[in-house]
Image (tube, rainbow, N blue to C red):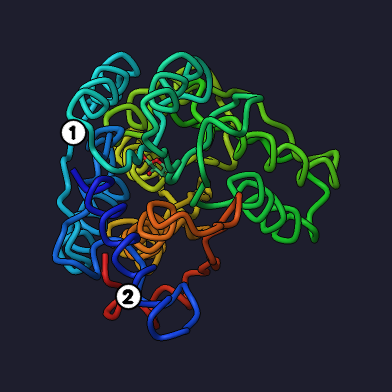
Amino acid sequence: MFKKSLLAVAAASMLTLTACGGTAGAGSAAGTSGGDKITMGFAQVGAESGWRTANTKSVQDSAKKAGVDLKFSDAQQKQENQIKAIRSYIQQKVDVIAFSPVVESGWDTVLKEAKNAKIPVILTDRAVDSSDKTLYKTFLGSDFVEEGKKAGDWLVKESKSSTDTVNIVEIQGTTGSAPANDRKEGFAEAIKADPKLKIVASQSGDFTRSGGKQVMEAFLKNNADIDVVFAHNDDEGLGAIEAIEAAGKVPGKDIKIITIDAVKDGMTALSNGKINYIVECSPMLGDQLMDLAKKVIAGETVPERVVTEETTFTQEQAKQVLASRPY
Ligand code: AHR
């Protein structure tokens, strides 16, 4: 167990510092000294999307690079599975727990158990709605409200020249998840700027391609006149494309599509003209997560919130960067 040896290393280095008269701090990050490995328990949401697969790879690759012993679990999009995984990490006395909460609420009890066991928790990718901020050390991930706003701002600009009503259907992410709640909020806020932009239907596709397809099929049956799809992730947008094509319409032309993520398949559809605009959400959180974990374990102060840097892509921009996208 790392903590005991950290104490030993700390005691030893205090002795060294006393003898040399130096200053504390340097080289104290866990896993980088003393040969002891940090053990991290990572409770992943699932494997619902291309984004999630890239995120899992990023965490696993970065753990290897940083010399962190990673215990990984896949919750298959179920909160109860994540809670079980976290409890098992507490029992195993890991040094740090990181997780990406499936939904925002219902975490206080298990987070209190981790806190009582003195195991620090790092939220990655998604937030919890707990009012007790002492239950976790930091939250690393995207600003999902901002992502929704960027999607809405593009549509406002795009629709400027016309006076016709724009009928929008929204394919939401997993019900109750932070990205679904926040992207919905950000998009709604942005399109308020133009009263002719109207959301005529909104339903969850659970961040999956099959969910996006099913929801879009239902939308097409019930709404004769759809101008725009706002899908909360690329996979849902890709599913919607299949439904639109099956209905004999041309995605990107008859019905415009805006998505979030910018994974390879999404960017390919954008450069082929089937998607019109993508807001980036970066899954490459592994390196930052390992750095934060080392700092937290070493007792260093870390920022409460670390926001991921992200951009947006038009069809032209997608064509330029597609070959060099890492995921
Ligand atoms: O939490 C990030 C979101 O979850 C991504 O946008 C989506 O693709 C994933 O499943």
Which residue is located at x 59 percent, y 41 percent? 227
Q: Between tags 1 and 2, which lies in front?
A: 1
Residue found at x 27% / y 34%: 43
Q: In this view, does 135 lie to the left or right of 12?
A: right
Q: Nearer the viewer, residue 36 or 195?
A: 36
Q: What element carries label 2?
A: helix
- Contact? badges 1 and 2 (CB < 8 Å): no
Q: What residue type is labelled 2?
A: Leu
**In this image, 178 relative to 234: left or right?**
right
Q: Position of residue 118 (x, y in %)?
A: 39, 32
Percent of width and height locating residue 159: 73, 55
Give the residue drawn at x 30%, y 19%. Answer: 78
Quarter, ligand 1: top left
Image position of 226 with respect to 105: above or below: below
Q: Is residue 186 left or right of residue 223?
A: right
Q: Name the residue under label 1.
A: 73
Estimate the x, y position of residue 89 in percent, counting from the top left.
23, 29
Instruction: Compare residues 61 and 216 and report the one nearer the observer.
Output: 61
Q: Mark 2 points at which residue?
A: 322
Q: Which quadrant of the figure contains the C terminus?
A: bottom left
Sequence order check, earlier mark of 1 and 2: 1
Is there any visible trace of residue 116 in the rendered image? yes
Residue 91 vs 173, above or below: the answer is: above
Secondary structure under badge 1?
A: strand
Q: Please identify the quadrant where the N terminus is shown.
A: top left
Which disc, if any, is residue 263? none
Q: In the rendered structure, which amino acid carries the disc numbered 1?
A: Ser
- Seen in the picture, residue 46 relative to 160 is either above or below; the reply is above
